[in-house]
Amino acid sequence: MAETISRRHHVVVIGSGFGGLFAAKRLKRAGVDVTLISRTTHHLFQPLLYQVATGILSEGEIAPATREILRRRKNVRVLLGDVSAIDLARREVTSAAGEMTTVTPYDSLIVAAGATTSYFGHDEFATDAPGLKSIDDALDVRSRILSAFEFAELSADPKERDDWLTFAVIGAGPTGVEMAGQISELAHRTLAKDYRAIDPRKARILLVDAMDDVLGTFGTKLSAGAAKQLEHMGIVVWLNDKVVDVDDRSLTVEDKSGGRTRIPARTIVWAAGVKASSLATDLAEQSGAELDRGGRVKVLPDCTLPGHPEVFVIGDMMSLNDYPGVAQVAMQQGKYAADQIRRRLRRKADKKPFHYFDKGSMATISRFRAVANIGPLRFGGFVAWVLWLIIHVMYLVGFKNRVTTVLHWAVSFIGRGRAQRTTSFEQIARHRAEPVSRR
Amino acid sequence: MAETISRRHHVVVIGSGFGGLFAAKRLKRAGVDVTLISRTTHHLFQPLLYQVATGILSEGEIAPATREILRRRKNVRVLLGDVSAIDLARREVTSAAGEMTTVTPYDSLIVAAGATTSYFGHDEFATDAPGLKSIDDALDVRSRILSAFEFAELSADPKERDDWLTFAVIGAGPTGVEMAGQISELAHRTLAKDYRAIDPRKARILLVDAMDDVLGTFGTKLSAGAAKQLEHMGIVVWLNDKVVDVDDRSLTVEDKSGGRTRIPARTIVWAAGVKASSLATDLAEQSGAELDRGGRVKVLPDCTLPGHPEVFVIGDMMSLNDYPGVAQVAMQQGKYAADQIRRRLRRKADKKPFHYFDKGSMATISRFRAVANIGPLRFGGFVAWVLWLIIHVMYLVGFKNRVTTVLHWAVSFIGRGRAQRTTSFEQIARHRAEPVSRR
């Protein structure tokens, strides 16, 4: 599109995740114009994506419209677009949406395009083992899980029925643990009495990881406690097992000694790894910056691209000091980049190198149970869960200012029922290879 | 699947809409086994589908899981399945889901498979003018409407921008009026300040109908009032105009004198007609029953198929006494069929012919405005709207017993904000022909 050349300093932000959104918000009264370009119309509160995938929350509840959040920021434009190229020499970003291509020039650029699911070189697994990174992923997984119980109810073959009632979650980090935990709650509480031919409580839920513990980053003691709690919930934890194959009815794991086991399972969720947006590669090629093993750009201590002080790369796309790929890092870097731009415009000295202030991390295992890692404290159980709930409720309320939403969520989460249980032939047809006729 | 032959009388119900669900519920303590077969896992509260399509409600809020509603009815089995054949001679229903085919024998059969969108012989319109009959339809329409504003914001060509900001709703019955009204609310209230390049309030909303009034069934006075109210909301009402062509950027209408006008519009919603499920044709062919113009089976006064007293055809699929295709008729017929089956088993005399008790009809035009037709009373305005709200809230609470849901709904509906505004490239790619790259 033809671009209105603004006289003010123009900051382009790529991505509406934690990094991009916090950068755009922080550029308030900075005397700059901001254009935020994103592939989705929403900001996604990823930490609760597993609750959409398991029917507790609707997509809108964790994905407020980006332009709604930024509507009072008159200096911010939001554009739907998939960034196809960044030209560091010309200082231009090219993005496409449908048939429309937009070229947006920038003075400063903040790249916060995040990460996608990594299958470690086996992208063909994606068809049968979807990841959990977007709203589309979550709705796909929801339809797979709910329809699996339906197919089990329909099946007359006990072996086939067992396969439909087997759910495998690959990756025992927070997302995998939360997914496995919620599939268990779904089977044992929500659906327990809904079927006639099957008993959903007999569902077999596997949590598989190549490493030797669950929630490894929380330390040995909490890991052991979490594993115990998961087993108490009927989840079978397979550690030291690497997934080497996936198809539409099974996964194959390999143990440390090289022995392989094929596990029949009709529903598989991949929560094992992430890789940086492919924009990281583009940026590295143009600037000579290095990429790390996860495809992340190695940035300078001030989060900029080597040789390009006007280009910040933040969040899950960048590699710096081994900071983890969590929302807090992205948010703090977004604010840091915005502050840096503001200082430069005011001809103030640059900020000190970026330093991540670790506020702690948490993961829920089930209703009423979580683990927390806050400063020197590591604790689990009910207290951690309450803390987790308070923090998440505060975040959601902060965005949406809708107390009824949060109330609704709290009731759904604590209660037996789940509001979001729709699926249909059309949705099932997208993930099941079998042809489905339409009436 | 192998079928357990029950010794008890076995009633098969096809469809989980108002007719099928109310029949299944009514067969409590009737000494029968019930199998309900449906293409979806949910009961759909169709009267509020337009609120899902315009971002007010999430799909789960109007589509509770059928088996959740029926979980305490231990005599009822719910099966996911698309009925491909009904064999009246062998008294068997064949249904398919994915690769599984199920044959279910019956003693009594209640066919309540409903209706789908009718394009009056122009099924090719479906691609560019989706109907509004299912959750999938509503989510598709939502993504089209929300993305149209995004594409308008992206466009630099004023003509193209106007086309993206033109929304045409075809059919001025309750669904069409409600859709047009909510697109107007969306443009004038929810989105008003969210864009920078466009002013959503300048969106052009057309309501087109081949007949000479809106909400024709509510009588001349209310029709005229509704038309006035719609125009007050900025909706352009085109009456006596028949849609003769639709493509991805326009619709063409023909007036009574045969003059044609092509109207550019990038978003078109079809709310003009319905036709009975194709099962109606199968039943008519086997039984010799007649079909009416809408493809509905002409049933006997007791809602059964001629020559087949054990087969009831109810709701939007049947034709009897010119009863309208509304939820109330289906619900009352569902109960009637259930009662008839119960009486026969108890060797009591048959019930009197089915008589529809018209509790009245209502349609909302905007927030705070509705029209109502109750017995001899016909009235519009705020009082009608409050009545509409109370009736719908009661229905929803009755099913879901979740006061927070309804509270959440009331706040969304009355307030400016809308909770469900997510769309993504993946969703847009399903309805826009243009190729969309994925990252």
Image: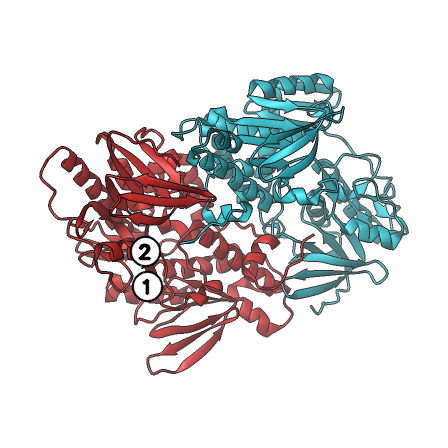
Chain colours: A cyan, B red
Q: Relative to the observer, which residue lies in front, B278 or A35?
A: B278
Residue B154's place in the image compared with A344, above or below, is: below
Residue B193 image offset from top left, x and y in percent: 57, 57
Chain letter of the residue carrying label 2: B
Residue density around tag 1, few if under 14, some if 14–19, many if 20 or more, within 10 Å: many
Mark sitting on residue B226: 1
Image check: B133 left or right of A290? left
> Disc 1 and disc 2: Cα gap in Å?
10 Å
Q: Relative to the observer, which residue lies in front, B351 or B371?
A: B351
Is the N terminus of chain B in the top left, top right, bottom left or bottom right quadrant?
A: top left
Element at label 1: helix
Residue B47's place in the image compared with A173, above or below, is: below
Identify the residue shown where x is 33% and y is 79%: B256
Identify the residue shown where x is 64% and y is 64%: B154
Identify the residue shown where x is 64% and y is 30%: A262
The amino acid pointed to by label 1 is Ala
Identify the residue shown where x is 63% and y is 23%: A237
Quarter of the figure with residue B150: bottom right
Q: Relative to the observer, which residue lies in front, A237 or A136?
A: A237
Q: Which residue is mark 2?
A: B363
Q: Of callouts 1 and 2, which one flags the residue occurring earlier in the amino acid sequence?
A: 1
Residue B324's place in the image compared with B236, above or below, is: above
Which residue in the rendered view is the most extreme toward the left? Answer: B349
Q: Relative to the observer, which residue lies in front, A73 or B343?
A: B343
